[in-house]
Image (cartoon, rainbow, N blue to C red):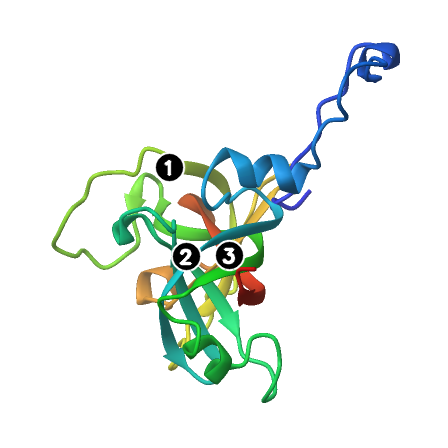
Amino acid sequence: MRIRPILAGLLAVGLAACQPQADEAPAPSSETAAADAVFAPQTAGTHTITGVLYEVRGEFPSYAIMVGPADGDPASMVQINALATEAGGAVEPEAMNALVTQPVTVRYSSQDSFGMVDILVNGASVLVASEGNTTSPDDLRTLEGVLSGAEGESGDLPSSLTVTGSDGTSVTFDAFIEPGMARANGQTVTLKYVAIPDLQLLSIAPAG
């Protein structure tokens, strides 16, 4: 199986227990419930939030908007990626810029992407040593499997690499290929990685 941003539902112990009582209000939809839980849910699926558009970053066709709570600190804002459409579209850059500092309603999708932290062969890292913080993230994950895709050079954009375990589980991530990674291609490695929520803008409009 491939690791994908899929949220598995929990199976209830008895169908009768799942049915609402006659005087019981229906449960809110997963999108509404998630939106009520935190300002910007990052669980897999589609979410709608209302806040203030603080900033639009980037250049055509890839942008990112920074949205935060209407009554909150801008430091709590979240980044949502946006792929611009043709002029006049729902995610058209000029339209987004016109909404900066205004209350907006944003609909977006969320799924996990994966970020490589380290690649080990026989317990030793194949990455070029770098200075800086070497503290491991709290949500660090590991997968032992065969590395593929680390061939040649990456060029201006990172390459898509995959580590596939013996049970078929795989993790695909983007990275610039280093010499040690290329030498490890086709070998069994230990991948250290983290899941990174990827938020993609679906629509933005003035909050009404």
Query: Quick check: 26 left or right of 93?
Result: right
Which mark's residue is nearer the viewer, 2 or 1?
Answer: 1
Q: CA distance from mark 3 to mark 2?
A: 32 Å
Disc 1, SS = loop
Say left or right for 8 vs 138.
Answer: right
Say few, some or many: other residues with alpha carbon within 10 Å of mark 1 (under 14 / 14 to 19 / 20 or more): few
Q: Which residue is mark 3?
A: 199
Q: Which mark is residue 184?
A: 2
Q: Is residue 106 left or right of residue 4?
A: left
Residue at x 38% of width, y 71% of height: 100
Residue at 54% over, 58% down: 105
Q: Report which residue position mark 1 lands on.
A: 140
**Under tag 3, what secondary structure?**
strand
Could you say where residue 113 lies in the image, as x and y percent from the top left?
A: 51, 53
Image marks 3 and 1: residues in contact by CB distance under 8 Å? no
Between the C-alphas of marks 3 and 1, the distance is 20 Å
Q: Specify whether 100 is left or right of 186.
A: left
**Residue 34, image x, y percentages:** 58, 37
Instruction: Name the outermost residue toward the front.
Output: 208
How far apart are labels 2 and 1 at the CA level? 21 Å
Give the tally of numbered discs.
Answer: 3
Q: Residues within 10 Å of mark 3 (few under 14, many from 20)?
A: many
Q: Horizontal and vertical percent for residue 29?
A: 71, 37
